[in-house]
Image (cartoon, rainbow, N blue to C red):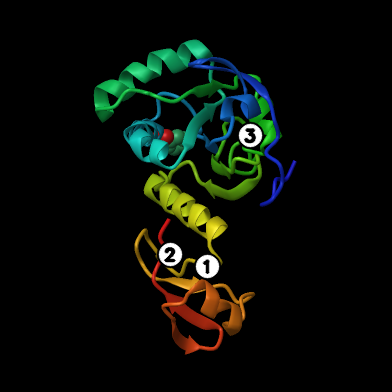
Amino acid sequence: MTLRLGDIAPDFEAETTEGRIRFHEWLGGSWGVLFSHPRNYTPVCTTELGYTAKLKPEFEKRNVKAIGLSVDKLEDHHGWSKDIAETQGASLNFPLIADADKKVANLYDMIHPNASDTFTVRSVFIVDPNKKIRLTLTYPASTGRNFDEVLRVIDSLQLTDKHKVATPVNWKQGDDVIIVPAVNNEDAKKLFPQGWKELKPYLRVVPQPKG
Ligand code: BEZ
């Protein structure tokens, strides 16, 4: 199934390193980052999982739960997690789905047969508290993802859900933002009483709103 932005993230039940979960129930009112990696006991995946574990405080600050997936068995996840702790300086502190029967991988189209018909690609799904998919990313097996970028997108989504702004190229927390085109100048005066810098009528820059 092709999943698109705005679709409801399909619910599923799965075995994980933290017990059996129902995805939607497990998410509760949090944001979610569901990501697949090709397989256990591989070098790039080891670094990705270690780094994601280190980001736990950052995820918590943003009300985000991370959950990984590979098409390996639960006992392999447990064995591999020791290697992650030993080599990456962080122990797994989020659940890892054991999807040996590829049920979840197929549900989320994480197997791209022309890349590999056996293993999942590096997929990322950001899901909001309404269970809507807000971002999808697909990376090849040979390229580790930038999980700081995942956090940056969450910051942008959380900000732009709250305020009538969009974030420009390479934006990061604290940088100026852009008033969305749907807001006319009359309404913009009420929303941004401190004014804005108008580079073009459609390109109006304001400091990042607080809160
Ligand atoms: C890795 O995680 O290192 C990896 C996995 C599959 C293919 C290439 C690299």
Task: Say what amino acid the circle numbered 1 marks.
Answer: Val
Residue 102: image location, x then y, percent? 65, 25
Q: Is residue 208 above or below residue 72?
A: below
Which residue is found at the position 25% from the left and 21% from the top?
Answer: 86
Which residue is found at the position 57% from the left and 24% from the top?
Answer: 71
As drawn, is 20 to the left or to the right of 10?
left
Give 170 or 199, whichever is nearer the viewer. Answer: 199
Task: Say what amino acid the circle numbered 3 marks.
Answer: Asp
Give 96 or 134, whichever is nearer the viewer. Answer: 134
Residue receiving disc 2: 209
Mark toward the start of the polypeptide (2 vs 3): 3
In the rendered structure, are the residues bearing label 2 and label 3 in contact, judged by CB atoms less than 8 Å apart?
A: no
Residue 175: image location, x then y, percent? 36, 66
Residue furthest right in the image: 1
Mark toward the start of the polypeptide (3 vs 1): 3
Task: Say what amino acid the circle numbered 2 marks.
Answer: Pro
Q: Distance between the residues labelled 2 and 1?
A: 9 Å
Q: Looking at the image, in which quadrant does ligand 1 appear?
A: top left
As drawn, is 16 to the left or to the right of 23?
left
Q: Residue 117 carries which label?
A: 3
Callout 1 secondary element: strand
Give 43 or 159, whichever is nearer the viewer. Answer: 159
Residue 56: image location, x then y, percent? 37, 33
Q: Residues within 10 Å of mark 2 (few under 14, many from 20)?
A: some
Which mark lies nearer to you, 2 or 3?
Answer: 2
Q: Is residue 209 above or below residue 206?
A: above
